[in-house]
Image (cartoon, grey):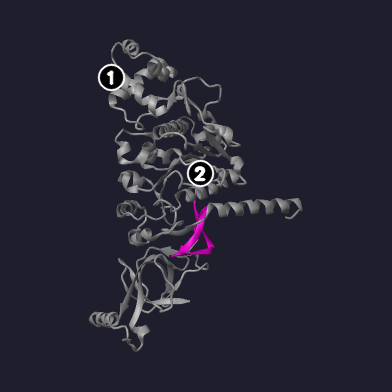
């Protein structure tokens, strides 16, 4: 059904469309119009709405004043629907000629009929393996069309998920990870500061999925969670690099850590925290100042949250367990999703846990590519999911020096390691880091500074979507990426809903197999 007619516009700007009086059109709607004489099909997106009239503005103001001051006055305007009407501004997304799509370099004719997009319009079909939601038309979801993202390339080229509190960032991440579970050549490491990805009492997570055998969960409270493995890290497995750029260390303190490591090997932290300062001072022939050693001891002890020889995660004692780093390496080789529960540790401790794990993954992949390229070719792409991203990628955090997360943002795509950075405040990330996040999932940002930061760094032009981004409701998203045809308006699945569907589908399949259905 037609919703309006084209009445103006230009290639560099937007089309102006006069709407039918009863047409239900919202900002964000996708529309279609076609030039009959050329056969061109124009795919449009509504970016603004306005009301207008054929009457002079002065006369309209006078009428409004009379109605305000004298309730008994009523005007019967001849052809009121023709004289007072709504219009919308729409940007041209793509033009279809024959079977090919082209950038918008021409215009539809005056009075061309405009209608809403529907499931028969193949323009919105996306090549991809990961289903994330339904095509969104304004406030409505077109459930006949599921939106998809491709996994290959997109993962190692990094993702940014941005939204205000309560808009659905974690729900999107779980939906995306559910999609990865169904694929065979990808792995992920999720650092979970709120313990909401694995699932537990009162909440559903990846452990409830039929493919839960592909999920590995590490937690300090492993004994109370069926299927969990213990999150424990011996300080003998830590390297100075795990602290660099993560906690506030001066260049002198960093040099001291390197000296400690070279002298004491795996026992460097034990010696730093256990020896008397005066003895360490003498051991290094007074090359490290006592004040530097004292400051390092205080910072490391605090960051590792140690109580005597052990803390909740870190321990000075040698453990008989297989190193968590070796367990994660094996899980990646098996194409699993690894969830690290950091909900019970402090900020610095969480960042060191993440830094140490990511350092080893990245260095392992880098070593393989340089020394065993054939083996590297068989390794899966790995996605690192980290919430509250400004803690490790923000301008303030990077003032402590380069860390592994910044390095992956710059170099990770070469080594099949990608970041999924989740944040409420993208404006806190440096512009260079934002530009490295090629895929952006935008779920609603009320702050002008945050909207500007995302819009200016997007790989596709979404400058006209600023109004829509501000108005996005929970679960409503705009996704921009070089791996899709155009900025994709999406209603993200509810994780709980698609979890029920996956469970039902598995049961149906098992039933069919049991009765011999082909």
Residue at 52 percent of width and 54 percent of height: 494
Closer to us: 221 or 452: 221
Closer to us: 152 or 54: 54
How far from the left and from the top, in percent, is residue 224?
58, 35
Closer to us: 128 or 476: 476
Say which label, 1 or 2, has the lower sequence index. Answer: 2
**Between marks 1 and 2, how big is the CA–CA gap?**
42 Å
Work out whether residue 40 can be spotted. no
Q: Is residue 406 magenta?
A: no
Q: Is residue 385 left or right of residue 337?
A: left
Work out whether residue 198 can be spotted. yes
For residue 291, the mark is 1
How far from the left and from the top, in percent, is residue 500?
60, 53
- Which residues make up the magenta segment? 126-150
Magenta: main secondary structure equals: strand
How far from the left and from the top, in percent, is residue 397?
32, 37
Q: Is residue 145 magenta?
A: yes
How far from the left and from the top, in percent, is residue 426?
35, 48
Disc 1 residue crowd, few under 14, some 14–19, many 20+, Cα 10 Å: few
Residue at 33 percent of width and 34 percent of height: 402
Residue position marked by numbered label 2 in the rendering: 196
Relative to 253, residue 461 above or below: below
Disc 2 residue crowd, few under 14, some 14–19, many 20+, Cα 10 Å: some
Q: Quadrant of residue 226?
A: top right
SS state under label 1: helix
For residue 251, the mark is none
Which quarter of the figure is the C terminus placed in?
A: bottom right
SS state under label 2: loop
């Amino acid at each position: 059904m037609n919703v309006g007619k084209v009445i103006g516009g230009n290639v560099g700007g937007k089309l102006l469309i006069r709407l039918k009086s009863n047409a239900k059109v919202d900002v964000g709607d996708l529309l279609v119009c076609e030039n009959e004489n050329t056969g061109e099909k124009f795919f449009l997106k509504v970016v603004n709405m306005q009301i207008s009239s054929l009457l002079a503005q002065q006369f309209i103001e006078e009428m409004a004043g009379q109605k305000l001051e004298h309730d008994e006055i009523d005007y019967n305007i001849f052809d009121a629907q023709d004289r007072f009407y709504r219009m919308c501004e729409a940007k041209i997304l793509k033009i279809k000629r024959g079977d090919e799509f082209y950038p918008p370099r021409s215009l539809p004719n005056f009075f061309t009929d405009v209608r809403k997009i529907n499931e028969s319009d193949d323009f919105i079909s996306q090549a991809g393996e990961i289903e994330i939601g339904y095509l969104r038309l304004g406030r409505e979801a077109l459930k006949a069309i599921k939106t998809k993202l491709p996994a290959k390339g997109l993962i190692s080229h990094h993702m940014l998920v941005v939204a205000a509190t309560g808009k659905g960032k974690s729900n999107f991440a779980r939906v995306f990870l559910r999609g990865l579970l169904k694929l065979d050549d990808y792995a992920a490491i999720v650092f979970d500061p709120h313990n909401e990805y694995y699932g537990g009492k009162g909440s559903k997570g990846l452990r409830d999925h039929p493919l839960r055998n592909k999920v590995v969960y590490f937690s300090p409270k492993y004994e109370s969670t069926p299927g969990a493995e213990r999150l424990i890290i011996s300080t003998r497995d830590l390297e100075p690099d795990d602290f660099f750029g993560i906690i506030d260390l001066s260049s002198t303190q960093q040099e001291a850590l390197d000296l400690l490591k070279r002298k004491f090997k795996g026992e460097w932290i034990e010696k730093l925290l256990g020896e008397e300062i005066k003895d360490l001072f003498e051991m290094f022939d007074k090359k490290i100042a006592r004040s530097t050693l004292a400051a390092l001891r205080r910072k490391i002890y605090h960051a590792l949250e140690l109580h005597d020889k052990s803390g909740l995660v870190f321990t000075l004692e040698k453990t008989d367990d297989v190193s968590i780093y070796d367990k994660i390496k094996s899980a990646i080789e098996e194409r699993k999703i690894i969830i690290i529960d950091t909900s019970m540790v402090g900020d610095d401790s969480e960042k060191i846990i993440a830094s140490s794990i990511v350092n080893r993954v990245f260095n392992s992949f880098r070593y393989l590519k340089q020394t065993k390229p054939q083996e590297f070719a068989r390794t899966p792409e790995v996605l690192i999911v980290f919430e509250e991203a400004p803690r490790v990628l923000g301008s303030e955090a990077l003032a402590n020096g380069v860390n592994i997360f910044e390095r992956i943002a710059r170099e990770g795509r070469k080594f099949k390691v990608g970041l999924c950075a989740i944040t409420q405040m993208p404006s806190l990330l440096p512009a260079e880091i934002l530009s490295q996040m090629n895929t952006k999932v935008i779920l609603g940002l009320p702050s002008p500074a945050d909207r500007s930061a995302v819009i200016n760094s997007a790989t596709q032009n979404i400058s006209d979507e600023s109004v829509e981004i501000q108005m996005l409701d929970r679960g409503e998203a705009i996704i921009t990426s070089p791996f899709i045809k155009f900025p994709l308006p999406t209603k993200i699945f509810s994780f709980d809903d698609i979890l029920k569907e996956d469970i039902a589908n598995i049961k149906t399949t098992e039933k069919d197999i049991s009765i011999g259905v082909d």
